[in-house]
Amino acid sequence: MKDRVKVVVTGAAGQISYSLIPRLVDGHTFEDKIVDLELVEIPQVVNKLEGLVMELEDSNFPNMGNVNYTANFEEAAKDADWFLLVGSIPRGIVFNGKKIEERADLLQINGGIFVGQGQAIGKFGKPDAKILVVGNPANTNALIGRHAANNESQLWMAMTMLDSSRARSVLSKKLNIGIGEISKMIIWGNHSPTMYPDFENIMVNGLSGKDLINDMSWVENEFLPVVQQRGKAVIDSRGASSATSAAKAALDTVMACERPTQSGDCFSAAVISDGSYGLPEGIICGMPLMTTPDGKVEIVRDIILSDLAKEKIKISTDELIDERAAVEDLLT
Ligand SMILES: NC(=O)c1ccc[n+]([C@@H]2O[C@H](COP(=O)([O-])OP(=O)(O)OC[C@H]3O[C@@H](n4cnc5c(N)ncnc54)[C@H](O)[C@@H]3O)[C@@H](O)[C@H]2O)c1
């Protein structure tokens, strides 16, 4: 009998999920495991998911198990292995009669969602459940959810894989190499324009990427701004935020956690800081991670940070500290 994995996806009727959900059951992300899906939406749109379920059935995915859709997160959370928390309220939307423009308002509203979901995950999710927060502001949402879950054996992550994919794409063009030739692409800090893509520690076919780039003017004037502002550039062009690339990044994060990391490599996600690298403790911060052969996700601790890197990372961790202060009432 094949192994099974139960995956909860929130925001299941949204843009990212439309790209993400089919690929959870295509036999690639979870290899040959049978994937049971719990698709969660807010009550106002949950019925739309009936159409998505029809499409999933009609696609004949070989690894699709039971599929359920619901607006009841607690029910969905029971014994789940993975939680992909995509659902959140975007900036600019009218919520309870008020247009949400300020980051502080966004933090409060979405933070409120993550208190309830966090409590349910802590209580009903598997003890070794992995949680990937995609909905923005992802790092602080994950902090709130993790606090509410109060379950140390579960792993809370916020997604920075999309930032690392963007950085790889820009670097591969600069160095005229394939994406797969780049390893150790680390994103430090917040999933926001302050995040720091670490060009100094990347490796290209065993060689130092920094030496191969050897062009600080390009790093400062092109690489960093392009990667940091890529989300905005996509929104400006599409009139909607990144969806298919965000879905791919979520799948890449799941796969990075499900398979052992190759020796000498690492992957990017934000997890709770324990003070490693002198980062402030108690924020969800982008860091280098690895999955051990027995399936544990750990912080990689032997990266060397230059003074320049420390200076840039501090800008992002300061922002995370400010965000934490803005939701202090949700962390008591
Ligand atoms: N971390 C990243 O790299 C990254 C990248 C791109 C987008 N995002 C973020 O991902 C989120 C989703 O993006 P999208 O384009 O799919 O948005 P979308 O608006 O198309 O979909 C979001 C969905 O979430 C649902 N939702 C809201 N609150 C919910 C709740 N409490 N429970 C369940 N569902 C809920 C909404 O009804 C909606 O269908 C946004 O916050 C976006 O900013 C993050």
Image (tube, rainbow, N blue to C red):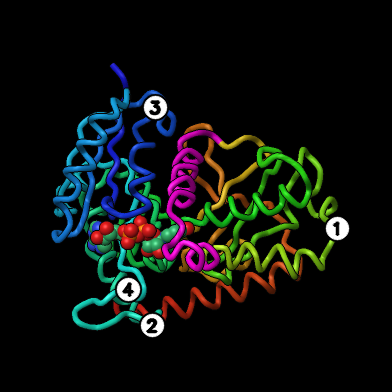
Please give the label number shown on residue 331. Answer: 4
**Tag 3 residue:** 27
**N-terminal-most mark, 3 or 4:** 3
Local SS, label 2: loop
Label 4 vs label 1, nearer the camera: 1
Q: Give the image location of residue 228, x and y in percent.
A: 60, 66
**In terms of sequence position, does the residue under pointer 4 or pointer 1 come before the other?**
1
Q: Residue at x 44, y 29 (%)?
A: 28
Q: Which mark is residue 84?
A: none
Q: Is residue 198 visible?
A: yes
Residue under label 2: 102
Mark sitting earlier along the chain (3/1):
3
Separation of residues labelled 2 and 4 (CA atoms): 20 Å
- Magenta residue span: 232-260
Q: Which residue is mark 1?
A: 214
Mark 1 near mark 2, Cβ–Cβ under 8 Å? no
Q: Check the picture and name the quadrant holding the N terminus.
A: top left
Q: Are marks 2 and 4 in contact (CB under 8 Å)?
A: no
**Residue displayed at 34% across by 32% down:** 25
Amino acid type at image mark 1? Asn
Badge 2 crowding class, 10 Å Cα cut-off, few under 14, some 14 to 19, many 20 or more, is few
Q: Quadrant of ligand 1?
A: bottom left
141 and 15: which is toward the camera? 15
> How far is the residue under mark 3 from the one under mark 4?
38 Å
User: Mark 1 near ligand 1 (CB under 8 Å)?
Assistant: no
Q: Is 84 placed left or right of 212 in the picture? A: left
Type of amino acid under label 4: Leu
Reply yes or no: does residue 256 show up in magenta: yes
